[in-house]
Image (cartoon, rainbow, N blue to C red):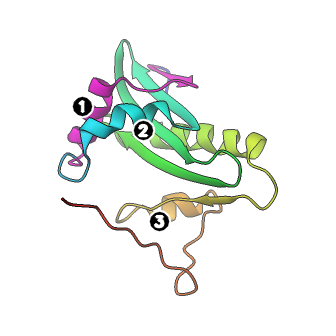
Amino acid sequence: MADYEVILHASPTLDEYISLCSSVGWEDVINFELQKTSIRNSVFSVIVKEKESIIGMGRIVGDGAFYFYIQDIVVHPDHQGKGIGKEILNALMKFLESNAPDKAFIGLFASNGKVKFYEKYNLKDNSPNMTGMFKVNSR
C-alpha cells in the first residue's frame, strides 16, 4: 500500500466513477446520468489514488441514521490483489463503528465470489431467513 494514498471523506468525480465502474464491467447496470447526485448524497466515501489517478473507491449510502449500505467497492483490475479493497472496507467499517448507532442495519450486496471477503468483517449471509433482492428499473 506504500504507493497508494487512501483519502477519507472524498468522493470520486463523475468521470472517475464512470472510469472505475467501467473497468470492472458495470457499465451495463449503472445509469451514469444519475450518479453525480448519488455520489453527492453518499453518507461517507473513500477513494484510493496512485499518484493523481483514482484506482479504488467505496461508499456508504442510506439515511445516515439507521440504514447504512456499503456500496460501490471497486478496485481497478490493474490494482486488484494488493490489499486495496481491504483498506477501503477497513475505512468504511471504521466510519460505521464510530457513526452507526446501536442496532443500526448495515447491509450490502456481495458480488459473486466475494462473500468470504465480507464475512471477515462480521457481515453475514442471512439466507434463508433474509434474502437480498433487487430490481434494476427499466423504462
The disc at residue 119 is none
Q: Earlier in the sequence, mark 3 or mark 2?
A: 2
Q: Which element type, helix, strand or loop, lies under badge 1?
A: helix
Q: Considering the image in quadrants, where does the C terminus appear?
A: bottom left
Q: Amino acid at mark 3?
A: Val
Q: Which residue is mark 3?
A: 115
Q: Amino acid at mark 1?
A: Ser
Question: In the figure, residue 109 lies in which quadrant?
Answer: bottom left
Residue mark closest to the camera, 2 vs 1: 2
Find the magenta span and give its range.
3-26
Residue assigned mark 1:
19
Q: Is residue 64 above or below residue 2?
A: below
Specify whether 61 is left or right of 103: left
Q: Is label 3 in a helix, a strand or a loop?
A: helix
Q: CA distance from mark 3 to mark 1?
A: 25 Å
> Closer to the camera, 80 or 125?
125
Give yes or no for contact between labels 3 and 1 (Cβ–Cβ under 8 Å). Answer: no
Q: Nearer the viewer, residue 76 or 42?
A: 42
Crowding at dot 2, Cα within 10 Å, few <14 / some 14-19 / many 20+, comes out as few
- Coordinates of residue 33 in the picture (x, y in percent): 25, 36
Q: Which mark is residue 38?
A: 2
Front-most of 86 and 65? Answer: 65
